Image (cartoon, rainbow, N blue to C red):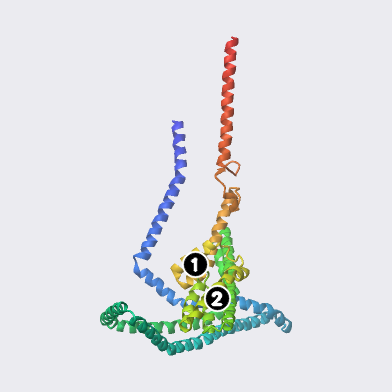
Amino acid sequence: MEEQKNTNEKVNWNIRPYLAIGLTAFLVIVGSLSFFFLIDRYHGFTAIVGKMIGILQPITIGLVIAYLMTPIVNFEERHLLPLAQKKMKDPQKAKKLVRVVSVLGALIFFVLIIAVLLLMVIPELYNSINGMIGTLPKQVNDFMDWLNEYVSSDSDISSYLEVGLTKATEFFENWAKTDFLPQTKNIMVGVTTGVINAVRVLFNVLVGIIISIYVLMSKEEFIGQSKKLVYALLPGKTANAIIHTVHKSNEIFGGFISGKLLDSLIIGILCFICLYFMNMPYAVLVSVIVGVTNVIPFFGPYLGAIPSAILIMLASPIQGVYFIIFILILQQFDGNILGPAILGESTGLSSFWVVFAILVGGGIFGILGMIIGVPAFAVIFYVFRRTVNHILRKKALPLSSEEYVSAEKLDIENHTFIDYQEEEASEKKSDKKRKSGILGRKLDARKGKKKK
């Protein structure tokens, strides 16, 4: 009876962890499915989320502007604060005065950059459109003259072309009657909605600038309140891990964004200088397009080069070809020399993971996702790597990935890796020794029998 009781207690003690694991897995699966159906089926939830995003848009814009202006504010404070403390007796008043001057200086710098870009792009864009409108009729007439001359020399081509033009005309007439005219009202509504949304975004940007000023004026207070909340709600180790991750995220994002902006500025200036000396049309507009799209990693240069090449080809096809060759050389210089020199190892990602992050970020969030996808994935990759390294340290295993390339089997007792070939060779040796030992014992036994 006592043995049976001990056995039952032993069984219950062994089953309990597995029951806990099974219950946890079941609850995780049920929670995941419930969350999925809540988002996918309940449209009211997505409507509420979309409305909240719209309401919080000015705050989001303000936080982004404040984050982008923080390095400028810090730079100004480092240089102005010692001077103000020498002139003023009260250090607190000096600090407040320097903060006000630094925030206003950063805001003026931010607004000036946007104003300069707009002043460079809008007149050039107007001249480009005006020039295309002026030269397009001549280009069309030249093309039609060439086409008439070519077609008149071949009767088969003229007949095919006549049939094609007739079908194209019929298709266009049917499309205008059945699709375009009935949708005119919807098109006007869409244009009106677009104008209203543009005005709303402009208003949100203005409100966001005001919010960014308040955030920058009290950034230390916000940081202190956030840390206090984290340490109040979470255990010490978890809170430390979260604070460290936030610091690392700020380091990755700040290094990547500031480095990418500097890299894009240099590329835009180099592009303008080269296009100016190559006597290319629309040099200013094309340089701005190339510089702005260069902020998007990997795919950005090509996104900016395609419309720029088309724009130049409309003015001069041969110069368009020269521009394509030039932009390929420029992007090779940026990708292999300038970019690595500025960005360095700010993200810690290989080329494969950079492309992966851009594709995933762009697929989910569009252009914005392509820009922030790389630093966001770099943060995720950093957290995952720290977690894996922590587990490996507990198991007393090496952290370098190079040591796992040829690893085939782990010796659990000694915490070392074993090569299967070496293991097989050692097993063969032990088998030989065992067989030779058995054979020796048999021979000794036979000798003993003979002696008897």
Residue 79 place in picture, x, y as percent: 69, 79
**Quadrant of the rendering where the C terminus is positioned:** top right
Q: Is residue 17 above or below residue 251?
A: above
The answer to whether residue 406 is above or below residue 144 is above
- Sequence-wise, the earlier of marks 1 and 2 is 2
Say if 23 sits above or below 348 in the image.
Answer: above
Q: Quadrant of residue 246?
A: bottom right
Graded by Cα atoms within 10 Å as few (under 14), some (14 to 19) or many (20 or more), the crowding at tag 2 reads some
Q: Nearer the viewer, residue 201 or 130?
A: 130
Amino acid type indicated by mark 1: Ile
Q: Secondary structure at mark 1?
A: helix
Residue that label 1 marks: 358
Q: State how far apart marks 1 and 2 are (Cα).
A: 25 Å
The one of 101 and 122 positioned closer to us in this rendering:
122
- How many badges with numbers are in the image? 2
Residue 134 image offset from top left, x and y in percent: 44, 90
> Does residue 80 appear left or right of residue 352 in this picture?
right
Q: Along the horizontal axis of the image, is 148 left or right of 421?
A: left
Residue 285 in the image: above or below residue 29: below
Relative side of 191 to 245, left or right: left
The residue most toward the top is: 452
In percent of the image, x 63 and y 69: which residue is there? 341
The answer to whether any part of residue 403 appears in the image is: yes
Residue where numbered disc 2 is placed = 326
Q: Is residue 274 left or right of residue 88?
A: left
Q: Quadrant of the N terminus?
A: top left
Q: Quadrant of residue 138?
A: bottom left
- Where residue 294 appears, x then y in whole percent? 53, 74
Amino acid on which the number 2 mark rests in the picture: Phe
